[in-house]
Image (spheres, helix red, strand yellow):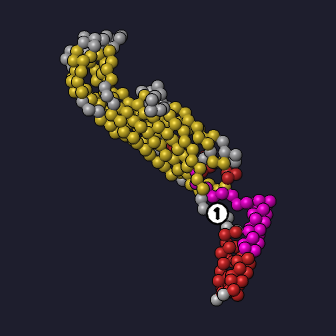
């Protein structure tokens, strides 16, 4: 029975000394951002579309097994008024609609927002010098994700990595309401957004080659020798204790 226990201990020690080469997947993630919380980009045709760059997967690291893309946004919507005439009061100004942001591989974040109606006063303006009024913003976060098919991996990988260039675009479709006497006040909306685009590369790392594999074997062999010596010392100590008893 004692011999069996020693044999099991040696096998366990050998397993610890020389772990198998990991076949588990690895993941690399890269993120590019547009706008910021202090400077969101207005969805008005001047800020978008814009170009961003992310790294490609370096095939020297291993074999690509999966590619995922995610777009995350924080969106804002406000009612925006313009007065082209005499000073006037207004009531019930509001805006609602959907903000869409499209990133890498057509991945899209869609956020629908609605502002709370409000009232106020508009200073006088003119056709060539309108007076504008921007109401309080409604805000929400959005996200969208895509899984890239294996047949498209070639666009996301290269030996040595390299750059993956893509375009981010944004759109806003909304409805507006409000009332002001005189007919010279116009009710609209203003949308803005900031966010990130992330690409995740799942891959199996390349197996050790040449000298690396030899070094790995030497390390395992050394570990086995060390474990064997340790076990012999433990067995000798136990035998001595048994004789003393």
Residue 183 drawn at (x, y percent) = 23, 17
Q: Compare residues 135 and 126 and report the one nearer the observer.
A: 135
Residue plotted at (70% across, 68% down): 18
Which residue: 69% across, 86% down? 244
Which of the pair 127/216 is nearer the observer? 216
**Rendering coords of residue 242 (x, y %):** 68, 86
Using the rendered image of the protein, determine whether residue 202 is visible from the camera's viewpoint: yes
142 relative position to 6: left or right: left
Q: Which region of the structure is painted magenta?
A: 201-230
Using the image, determine if residue 205 lies above or below residue 13. Answer: above
Magenta: main secondary structure equals helix
Q: Residue at x 50, y 34 (%)?
A: 34
Residue 217 appears in the figure: no
| Pointer 1 local density, CA inside 10 Å: few below 14, some 14–19, many at least 20 | few
Query: Which residue ends up furthest to the bottom in the rendered image?
Result: 1
Q: Most extreme residue toward the front, as rendered?
A: 244
Quarter of the image containing the N terminus? bottom right
Left or right of residue 141: residue 23: right
Badge count: 1
- From this view, report whether residue 70 is shown above or below residue 229: above
Q: Quadrant of residue 162?
A: top right
Q: Is residue 87 above or below residue 120?
A: above
Q: Does 107 sit above or below residue 14?
A: above
88 left or right of 111 in image: left
Residue 182 in picture, x, y percent from top left = 20, 15
The answer to which image quadrant residue 76 occupies is: top left
Which residue bears the numbered disc 1? 22
Q: Residue at x 58, y 37 (%)?
A: 53
Is 221 included in the stretch rendered in magenta?
yes
Residue 105 position in % (x across, y down)? 52, 44
Magenta residue check for 186: no
């Amino acid at each position: 029975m004692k011999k069996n226990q020693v044999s099991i201990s040696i096998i366990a020690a050998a397993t610890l000394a020389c772990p198998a080469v990991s076949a588990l997947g690895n993941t690399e993630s890269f993120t590019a951002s547009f706008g910021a919380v202090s400077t969101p980009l207005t969805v008005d045709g001047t800020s978008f579309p814009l170009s961003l760059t992310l790294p490609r997967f370096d095939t020297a690291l291993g074999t690509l097994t999966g590619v995922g893309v995610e777009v995350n946004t924080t969106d804002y919507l406000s009612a925006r008024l313009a007065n082209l005439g005499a000073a006037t009061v207004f009531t019930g100004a509001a805006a609602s609609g959907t903000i869409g942001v499209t990133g890498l591989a057509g991945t899209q974040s869609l956020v629908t927002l609605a502002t709370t109606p409000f009232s106020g006063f508009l200073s006088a303006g003119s056709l060539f010098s309108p007076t504008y009024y921007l109401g309080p913003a409604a805000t929400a976060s959005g996200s969208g994700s895509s899984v890239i098919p294996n047949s498209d991996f070639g666009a996301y990988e290269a030996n040595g990595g390299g750059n993956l260039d893509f375009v981010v675009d944004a759109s806003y479709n909304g409805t507006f309401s409000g009332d002001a006497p005189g007919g010279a006040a116009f009710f609209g909306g203003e949308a803005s957004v900031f966010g990130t685009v992330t690409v995740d590369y799942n891959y199996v790392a390349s197996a050790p080659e040449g000298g690396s594999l030899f070094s790995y074997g030497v390390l395992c062999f050394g570990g086995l020798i060390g474990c064997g010596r340790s076990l012999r010392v433990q067995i000798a100590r136990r035998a001595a204790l048994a004789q003393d008893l």
